[in-house]
Amino acid sequence: MSRTRPPATAPAFPMLVAMTGLALLTLNLIVPSLPAIAAEFDASYASVNLMVGGYLGVTALVQIVAGPLSDRVGRRPVVLVALAVFVAASLTCLLATSLWLLLAARMVQAAIIALSAMAMAILRDTHPADTAAARIATLGMAMAIAPMVGPVLGGALEATVGWRAGFAVYTAAGLTLLAVTWRSLDETHRPGTGGLGGIGRDIGALLNLPRFRGFAISAVFSVGAFFVFLAGAPLVASATFGLPPAALGVVLGSISAGFFCGSFVSSRIIARAGLVRLVLAGRVVACTGLTLGLIAYAAGLIGSLGYFAATITVGLGNGLTMPAVHSGLMSVRPDLAGSAAGLAGAMIVAGGAALSTATGLVLRADVAAPMLLALLLATCSVGLASALWLLQDERRILSRA
């Protein structure tokens, strides 16, 4: 399966978009079907919700293994095996006759998240750092669209066909992409030496690099703000502003729209701005928007529209920051780009889960609106501090040169 000599040209970009899109769609396309699944198997909603929460936890484990593994055996084998496992798991979900078989197969489906890390690693394998970041920014636009499309498509399938239709779509999409990658995906990374036992050493080597830690902290607390928003926005929308459920969908989608716009801008300017400056710019945009929103809300100058306009800057800032962060993470040790992508992905999921849980524990209905803005600002400020350190470190490196 592995072709050890890297090709002269990168794989077709639409294939990388499809890899990333399928990985992300697999998370939330089935969300509208959860009540129907609970009803069919006479199960509690909490049990069925493991198909989302438990799945998310398994994706962190998959990324921390798949990324380093791809540095050892190559990107192509990891992509093909992940797709084959995903197809088998999706088919099992489609035919499942018990809740526990469905849950077990759903956890195995998490293998597909490896494709997201592989797509970014492949871009870094085949492009210089700045060019890779621009391509990752374009990929980011697809990453913004997928979370919005998934629930809409899943809801339509549930309403017209039933909950198993979602898993039929997963199976068909996985088979199609498996055929495409089998035929068209060449190896882009020369497999490393030392065997699988060196995976732990690779991860340790990355964590020991201050510059990797700087990019990773920016990533965790940038995406972490998104998780904070998702955890707190429904309470603010209902308890503070009395918005109906339909409006809540628009509110939750607004931050993804901001991410799409930020990614578009990033793809156009990153070659001129540089990685670290774009990381910093995104953090400044987010912190400035949230600060102004907090001041305006405290002064009674804005209602729901102005409030959620301020939170859109979280998405906009992330669209600017994240492509540069991903490229920076994989550029610290280009020979360990897969390890860097997988480790960072696992850290982002773990950090997001922790911040989301913390938000749910501390947010109170009577002060939800200002408290959510304060939590978002605090989270983004950690990313800003890390970006400032990266800028200082870059200047120190340049002065030595």
Image (cartoon, rainbow, N blue to C red):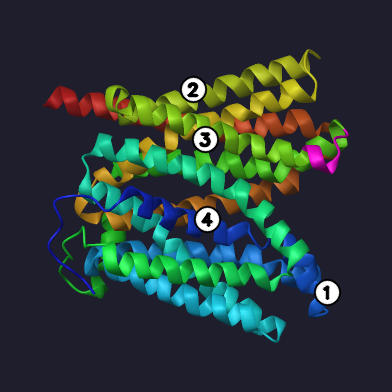
> In the shown orientation, is residue 46 left or right of residue 142?
right
Q: Secondary structure at mark 4?
A: helix
**Pointer 4 or 2: first along the chain:** 4
Q: Amino acid at mark 1?
A: Ala
**Pointer 3 or 1: first along the chain:** 1
Name which residue lies at 45% across and 57% down: 346
**Pointer 4 or 3: first along the chain:** 4
- The residue that mark 4 highlights is 24
Residue 304, quarter of picture: top right
Q: Secondary structure at mark 3?
A: helix
> In the shown orientation, is residue 280 left or right of residue 356?
left
In 3D space, how far apart are the residues under numbered discs 2 and 3 (Cα atoms)? Answer: 18 Å
- Crowding around mark 4 (Cα neighbors within 10 Å: few <14, some 14 to 19, many 20+) is many
Q: Amino acid at mark 2?
A: Val
In 3D space, how far apart are the residues under numbered discs 3 and 1 (Cα atoms)? Answer: 36 Å
The numbered dot on residue 284 is 2
User: Residue 354's x, y, as percent?
Assistant: 60, 52
